[in-house]
Image (cartoon, rainbow, N blue to C red):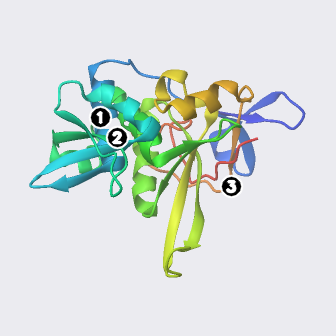
Amino acid sequence: MGCDKRKGGGTKRVLTRNLANRRIPINARPAPEYNDDFSEGVRHGITYGDGSIQYGRAHVCLFGEKESLSKWFDSYGQKATGGTIATKEHVRVRMLPIEWKDLPDSSASASYWRGFVAGLIATDGHIDRRGSVMIHNKDKEVLNHIAECMAIAGFVQSGITMTREISPYDGENKPVYCLRIFKETINERDILHPLHAENFIQSPRARHSTILLFQLKKLIATRKCSAVSSLKHILSLSAMAT
């Protein structure tokens, strides 16, 4: 059974097979614990977003307001450097696991995935003054994988779109994609970048969003297919914020 949200308010219970072309309320998993797994995921997400590899290890250079993210790496070597004509002042975190430049394993815990996405929002993401939460990447498949896996952590995507096709720097075809996350599935503890936090806190309160199911296709239910946790057969869907 599913729940169809009607125009003008109210809901109607309908069979899952009859949900095509109907809107259903977002029913995300609750946020997992903010524990050591979360913290480790944060470090992984920051490194994945802003890190580089040198001499077989990963390193992260944190500039400007991102320097505050260095507190997540207290047990790793850090060095404040720059401040020259060639290099801006920044904090360099050294000797990090090289695997942090790869995506987490799909089987990582919900808390780990929650932390990873939080770290990635702080580095490769943006939160505007409306509180819209997004992550950017040049590889759409990477965002698809993140969107699928982050569902176990209580995050729900509202869509992936191409925000740029042609590079403004060299005129070549270099698309950039944007993964948007429903604001109501984000907590303040997930916002690690100071400017992001300011925008998020001052933004209008999140409305209860719905998604539009436009095509039904039976899949095997797994823990990763949990954007609508009340459905046992997850279907091809188009997510639209309302």
Q: Nearer the viewer, residue 31 or 177?
A: 177
Q: Is residue 210 above or below residue 68?
A: below
- Image quadrant holding the N terminus, namely top right
Where is residue 130 drawn, in percent x and y?
A: 71, 37
Of all residues, the one furthest to the front in this rendering is 85
Give me the disc on residue 43: 1
Disc 3 to disc 2, C-alpha distance: 35 Å
**Which mark sits nearer the N-terminus, 3 or 2?**
2
Q: Earlier in the sequence, mark 3 or mark 1?
A: 1
Mark 2: amino acid: Ile
Q: Is residue 225 above or below residue 202?
A: below
Instruction: State the image coordinates of residue 131 (x, y, percent, origin top left).
Output: 66, 35
Residue 15 appears left or right of 7? left
**Residue contact at pointers 1 and 2, CB within 8 angstroms:** yes
Residue 95 position, x and y percent, is 13, 41
Q: Check disc 3 and give the amino acid type.
A: Phe
- The circle on residue 214 is 3
Name the residue: 69% across, 37% down.
129
> What is the distance, in whole Å, between disc 3 and disc 1 at their CAs?
38 Å
Q: Residues within 10 Å of mark 2 (few under 14, many from 20)?
A: many
CA–CA distance between discs 1 and 2?
5 Å
| 46 sits to left or right of 227 | left
Query: Callout 1: few (<14), some (14-19), or many (20+) C-alpha neighbours within 10 Å?
Result: many
Which residue bears the numbered disc 2?
46
Q: Identity of the amino acid at label 1?
A: Arg
Query: Is residue 230 visible from the viewing direction of this image?
Result: no
Q: Please name which of the two marks, 3 or 2, marks the residue nearer to the observer.
A: 2
Query: In the picture, residue 34 is in which quadrant?
Result: top left
Q: Nearer the viewer, mark 3 or mark 1?
A: 1
